[in-house]
Amino acid sequence: MIPRICIIEDDASLSRELAHIIELSDMNADVVTDNFTKAADHVIASQPDCVILDLKLPQTDGHKICRDIRAQSLVPIIMLTSSENEFDEVLSMNIGADDYVTKPYRPAVLLARIQAALRRSAQTRSDTILSYKDVELNTSQATVTYHGKTAELTRNEQRILQLLMRQPETVIPRSEIMCALWESDAFIDDNTLTVNVNRLRKTLTSLGVPDDFLITRRGLGYSV
């Protein structure tokens, strides 16, 4: 999958230059050059793989956009600015920016920073996002998504789904699931696990997930 980089920059010539450099590096560029007050909404809606964000923008500023993006997304954000003010750099990192590059930038260095941000993001995603048969579990947000629809999960629903999706097409014994939920399978009513699994099924069904996604292996356990 080709990475898509969102560029939020009011200097049209610079944004074109950035887009050209990015596309020469086999990535796609998505350029925002106006209506900067809606820039964060654009990022949330378009879901790029990385954002290059100018600090000084008309009608608003990069710090506000960074805050607004970070409130809803973990997408890597690289601040690109002519400011060499240490306060601006510290503030940028404190509000959620992943990196800070000053102008004039060296293309090779900026590309290296982008690639590093993409690698870190991919590692974070592999730790927090599990996907199988179009079902996506976000363990950091305790949500499950299917074909654009998202639902929140209870603690037990998340743990059951996480355990099953980490080992797809493998039957997970009921005792193992119970230990994962309650740190023991002793003195736990077997029906309690059934109730939790049924709640998870209802949540998945509400999103349109097919009934055969979560399978009961009678006398053995469950699988996806």
Image (cartoon, grey):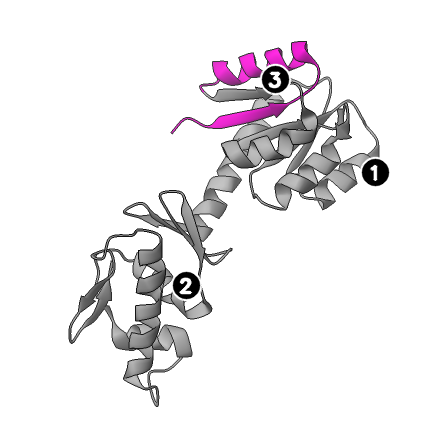
Of the numbered discs 1 and 2, the one sitting upstream in the chain is 1
Above or below, 184 relative to 10:
below
| Residue furthest front in the image | 206
Inspect this view and state whether residue 166 appears.
no
Q: Dot 2 lies on which element?
A: helix
Which of the two marks, 3 or 1, is nearer to us in this view? Answer: 1
Above or below, 65 relative to 33:
below
Residue type of the residue flagged with mark 2: Gln
**Going by the image, does 10 lie left or right of 151?**
right
Instruction: Please report the bounds of the magenta region as a residue range.
Output: 1-26
Give percent across and percent down for residue 133.
27, 47
Above or below, 56 relative to 91:
above
Q: Dot 3 lies on which element?
A: helix
Quarter of the image where the N terminus is located: top left
Quickly name the residue at label 1.
87
Asked whether 19 falls inside the magenta stretch, the response is yes
Which of the two marks, 3 or 2, is nearer to us in this view? Answer: 2
Distance from Cα at disc 1 to Cα at disc 2 = 40 Å
Quarter of the image where the C terminus is located: bottom left
Give percent across and percent down for residue 184.
37, 82
Q: Residue at x 40, y 47 (%)?
A: 149
State the mark number for residue 158: 2
- Determine crowd level at label 3: few under 14, some 14-19, many 20+ residues with C-alpha closer than 10 A: few
Give percent across and percent down for residue 40.
63, 34
The answer to whether mark 1 and mark 2 are in CB contact below 8 A is no
Residue type of the residue flagged with mark 1: Phe
Quickly name the residue at label 3.
107
Distance from Cα at disc 3 to Cα at disc 1 = 25 Å
Q: Quadrant of residue 21?
A: top right
Q: Quadrant of residue 212?
A: bottom left
